[in-house]
Amino acid sequence: YYEGRRTAHGGRCAVLRDGCQDANDLTKALAEMGRRMAGTAGRVSVYGAFGGRLDQMAAALNALHRWPGTGGPPASLRLFSDDCSAVLLRPGATHVVRLHAPWEDGGSCGLLPLGGACSVVTAGLRWDLDGTVPLAFGGLVSSSNAVEEDGSGYVDVIVETDAP
């Protein structure tokens, strides 16, 4: 079902109605975006992704884990809220996560295992991980690790993982 609406800037946007109760609005929007972007690459950013409730945060992380399995393109997906962001680091690559440093006394960086245990090696964190202890819910979760800004305004964190 398509319905056109005027935006604040005078343009038109689509309002799609989907009565399915087995997926939340973010998952539905990402599936539609995947259909529209089929075969293209790039970056997809979702602002206000976490909704302020734990169940909505968990659903957003689930959508992140499923992307692009929901029909999405080979684009990176980043989720943002007012005070945090999330990106899924897939295995088989060395990831350089560039963090902007708006903090005064250092910032934090958490690495959460999604979908199962994973071995992670990092560089650029105060307490780097060496891959000897797997990250897993019910075990070690690397929350509140620290990053230290070097005066450039950015910090690069290097991450290798064997699972998402």
Image (spheres, rainbow, N blue to C red):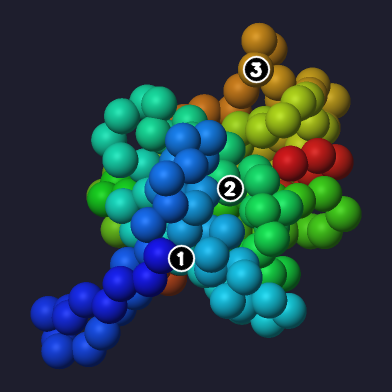
Tell me which label, 2 or 1, sits earlier in the chain. Answer: 1
| Amino acid bearing label 1 | Ser
Separation (CA) of disc 2 from disc 3: 17 Å
Please give the residue where the numbered disc 1 appears in the rendered image.
45
Is residue 80 in view?
A: no
Separation (CA) of disc 1 from disc 3: 26 Å
- The outermost residue toward the front is 1
Residue 132: % across, % down = 84, 25
Name the foreground residue: 4 vs 55.
4
Residue 90: % across, % down = 76, 51
User: Do callouts 2 and 3 mark residues in contact (Cβ within 8 Å)?
Assistant: no
User: Do callouts 1 and 3 mark residues in contact (Cβ within 8 Å)?
Assistant: no
Callout 1 environment at 10 Å: few (<14), some (14 to 19), or many (20+)? Answer: few
Tell me which label, 1 or 3, sits earlier in the chain. Answer: 1
Please give the residue where the numbered disc 2 appears in the rendered image.
64
Q: Which numbered mark, 1 or 3, is in the foreground of this view?
A: 1
Name the foreground residue: 106 vs 74.
74
